[in-house]
Amino acid sequence: MVPSRRTWNLGATPSLRGLWRVGRAQEPQPGMARPAPASPAARPFPHTGPGRLRTGRGKDTAAGSDEDSSARSATRPTLAQCRALSVDWAGPRSPRRFYLAVQVENLKEKLLRQAQEVSHLPSEPGGTDLEKHRDLLMGENERLRQEMRRCEAELQELRAKPGAACPGCEHSQGRAHCAHTLWSPVFSLPLQYVIKTVEVESPKTRQALSESQARSQHLQEQVAMQRQVLREMEQQLQSSHQLTTQLRAQIAMYESELERAHGQMLEEMQSLEEDKNRAIEEAFARAQLEMKAVHENLAGVRTNLLTLQPALRTLTNDYNGLKRQVRGFPLLLQEALKSVKAEIGQAIEEVNSNNQELLRKYRRELQLRKKCHNELVRLKGNIRVIARVRPVTKEDGEGPEAANAVTFDPDDDSIIHLLHKGKPVSFELDKVFSPRASQQDVFQEVQALITSCIDGFNVCIFAYGQTGAGKTYTMEGSSENPGINQRALQLLFSEVQEKASDWQYTITVSVAEIYNEVLRDLLGKEPQEKLEIRLCPDGSGQLYVPGLTEFQVQSVDDINKVFEFGHTNRTTEFTNLNEHSSRSHALLIVTVRGMDCSTGLRTTGKLNLVDLAGSERVGKSGAEGSRLREAQHINKSLSALGDVIAALRSRQGHVPFRNSKLTYLLQDSLSGDSKTLMVVQVSPVEKNTSETLYSLKFAERVRSVELGPVSRRAELGSWSSQEHLEWEPACQTPQPSARAHSAPSSGTSSRPGSIRRKLQPSGKSRPVPV
Ligand SMILES: Nc1ncnc2c1ncn2[C@@H]1O[C@H](COP(=O)(O)OP(=O)(O)OP(=O)(O)O)[C@@H](O)[C@H]1O
């Protein structure tokens, strides 16, 4: 404890004894050298600091005299030192005075330092240690000040006694302030005491001071922290103050706005109140006006009511009158119905009679159409001859023999030119098809004939020509490019389909061949069986073939099956089919039977599609045996066909149908108003020009037979038997006269190609060259 250290016990502590020795050591001895003058910048007496004293205290006594001598030299102050300390240096430089001055200076310095420390200590209350330390320091200061005052007083006193010599002082003058006076027990004790006290307390003070400084440092840090916290809190408080100020300003603003809004609301309420009152007043005034108008209307209505009452009475009377009338209405209705029924019956009768009339007209028109068609065909020629030239094929070979010998007229499609043995020969037919003509082109030419079959006409289409000239190609064709046979049946199907709403049709087909004048059924179960042609037992004069199979066909598929079946029968029968087919006539007989659903009218038409045997003159080439026989039969049948066609065209009374099986079988399809078309197939190459020449001559001859007037008349009589129209027994309509319809128009002037007829020799047919 610092205060306890202040209890002085001078003789007890070793430190005091050390200090005493130091003090003695510092005493100037006689003969000692003056201390060396210190540098002006140095402290007045630097070696007299506490450290120096402490070092001297411990070691000087024991160690030796080096330090004592230096200390002694140091204790004598230099002139400069004395001046620096404002020591009166007029007399001898007394160490005593000098020490006092030094003491005073040291004390001042110490005092100043401690005063600084005290000023640096924080002045806040609550720091207990700090406060104590400060108190201590202040007490110490006070004590030091007192000490310093005392030293100064002593110093003054020494100055004031110039005559007092100090024993042992080397100077006689100025003894008054000789340092020796310091040695007097009276004077020296307090100083020693002070020195010792300072010497003793200085380390403790310094230690306490350092501790206090450390604590002070710590406290300063804490204080700094507290100050920081305080500053932050002050800032927060300041910002809170600012916020509060702002909020208060806002509240004030809101309050003023509220007040203003309240004022406005009051004003609006007042104006609304005024509006309301005004509206009520206006509504009231309006209501009063309306009420007045309603009253006026009511008065008017009352007046009207009074005037309407008589009208109402009139209406009531009318109503009663109507009621009475309604009561009598059923009677009226019955009467009206009766009269209407009578009218309707009359109308129905009229319609019936009209219908009858229409039916009659329809039938008449039908006959007229048929007549027109007949006339058209007649004008074209009932027997028409066309030629088709096949293209040159590989089978024709090469070289001059395969050279083309046939040319055409670019301006007239009925002319064909043949170069025979270097001579050009021309023929005129109804139409000539070049090798470029397609199957469809040829079919186009014949399809009018085919459709006439649906109307009940008999039609015959022949393919005539030498072997390999293209007869089968034209009639049958290939599956990809079918010929007339298949296209004809397809056309019949489509036509029949179109008329299905009014007519019922059945189409049947038969396939036969004539080989060596033997007729065979290619669809029968016994294809090798010979068939005969007979007259119908019904006395109609019609021919029929007992046992000839007829297949009913309804589609193209059915036709294909029929052809396939016929082909199979032919294949199994003959080993060399191609050879055989060239030497036989193949016939496809299509029968179309129809019935008009509304009139009951029945029709039957026959379409004979004939692929004739090759027309080449085998017999003249010296053939023998079966070949000769075949050739003779072919010759016979083709001659017969030529004769028949010639007879028909020339309208001869007798037509030699029975001269061959072929003409006999086709009799009903060649005579009357039936239509015949012959397609003469022609090979174009040089080697076949002879056969081509004969074929074309035959075709032209057939076509160019002149119709004589006698034949026509005679034919008029015979044609009446060829009527295909049959009538239902129920229909009482008289059968139209076939004669009338089939009669040709007067004269022949309307027939096209009359110029050709003038050029042709008159009518006798010649036998077909075979
Ligand atoms: N217009 C044509 N276009 C192309 N090829 C044809 C034509 N006409 C005939 N041909 C071909 O000529 C060849 C002989 O024809 P096709 O068999 O029809 O003669 P054909 O007169 O019927 O003989 P056949 O009397 O022996 O039956 C066949 O190969 C056929 O394909």
Image: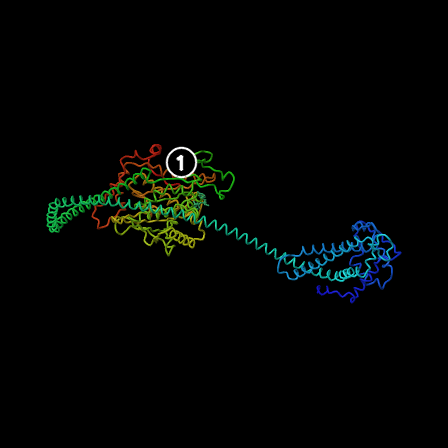
Q: Is residue 627 visible in the rendered structure shown here?
A: no
Q: Residue furthest right?
A: 31
Which quadrant of the figure has residue 118?
Answer: bottom right
- Can you say whether 171 is above or below 385 in the image? below
State the residue at coordinates (44%, 46%).
623
Q: Is residue 424 visible in the rendered structure shown here?
A: yes
State how many labels appear: 1
The x, y position of residue 755, in whole percent, is: 34, 32
The x, y position of residue 183, in whole percent, is: 82, 59
Instruction: Name the quadrant where ligand 1 sits.
Output: top left
Amino acid tagged 1: Asp
Q: Is residue 208 left or right of residue 48?
A: left
Q: Residues within 10 Å of mark 1 (few under 14, many from 20)?
A: some
The x, y position of residue 79, in whole percent, is: 83, 50
Q: Which residue is mark 1?
A: 413
Which quadrant of the figure has residue 383?
Answer: top left
Q: Residue furthest bottom?
A: 12
Which of 187 and 219 lies nearest the eye of the viewer? 187
Q: Is residue 447 left or right of residue 368?
A: right
- Can you say whether 340 is above or below 407 in the image? below
- Can you say whether 270 is above or below 133 in the image? above
Which of 298 and 142 lies nearest the eye of the viewer? 142
Q: Element at badge 1?
A: strand
The x, y position of residue 450, in whole percent, is: 34, 44
